[in-house]
Amino acid sequence: MSLKNRYSSYDLECGTDEAGRGCLAGPVTAAAVILQPTFENIILNDSKQLSEKNRYLLKPIIENECISFGVQHILEPEIDDINILNASIKAMQGSISQLSPSPEYIIVDGNSFKPFQSIPHATIVKGDSKYLSIAAASVLAKTYRDDYMAKIHNEFPMYNWKQNKGYPTKEHRAAIKKYGITKYHRKSFRLLPQQYKLDV
């Protein structure tokens, strides 16, 4: 099934999505993209359906061919402070605020959003596999977040964030059990299953 270019009748419609919501470490990262009404790409899909190679192949195509894009990280202390749902919405709104021109309509992946600058919006479950602009935003959010995790991997290589990107893999949890936590871990998340005690 090919992805649609528009949900609304507005030319300046932006799609927005986030990456890293379920991670134990690192930021939640969102992107927003306004695509040309004529934009087409046969590879572009929900970033989770794409290989890493194709995500990085698409990144410069999206950035060079779109009307505008924005990317926003929300870091761990703020995630702990306002919770991951609010942090995800704040990241999406922050990425939208970077767009120039401003969008006339916003389409959001998922079912949670808060009104932003009185711009009309729609939330679309699995929107990243239905609309090109949300798919494009999902690719940018994922690649920018992966780059961030690869950078902080060098600071704490024992957690292998370059590979697991901060997700709760067995390897990541084993490293937390062995080495404890870092400034990049989200203290409000259950970092280990309950049978392990973790002193925070």
Image: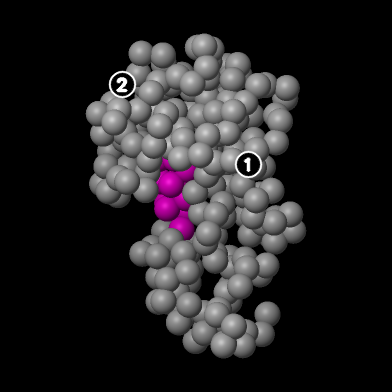
- Element type at marker 2? loop
Q: Is residue 62 visible?
A: yes
- Element type at marker 1? loop
- Left of 179 or right of it: where is 55? left
Tell me the quarter of the image containing the C terminus.
bottom right
On the image, the x and y values in percent for residue 48 come to 37, 48
Amino acid at pointer 2: Glu
Label 1 crowd (10 A; few <14 / some 14-19 / many >=20): some
Identify the residue under disc 1. Answer: 112
Report the Cα–Cα distance between label 2 and label 1. Answer: 27 Å
Magenta stretch bounds: 137-149
Tell me the quarter of the image containing the N terminus.
top left
Q: Main secondary structure of the magenta part?
A: helix
- Left of 107 or right of it: where is 42? left
* N-terminal-most mark, 2 or 1: 2
**Residue found at x 48% / y 64%:** 166
> Residue 123 sits in which quadrant?
top right
- Left of 135 or right of it: where is 180? right
Q: In front: 44, or 77?
A: 44
**Residue found at x 49% / y 49%:** 19
Q: In front: 99, or 45?
A: 45
Label 2 crowd (10 A; few <14 / some 14-19 / many >=20): some
> Residue 157 sits in which quadrant?
bottom left
Is 139 covered by the magenta stretch?
A: yes
Image depth: mark 2 or mark 1 in front: 1
Q: Is residue 94 visible?
A: no
Is 177 covered by the magenta stretch?
A: no
**Residue found at x 52% / y 84%:** 177
Identify the residue under disc 2. Answer: 40
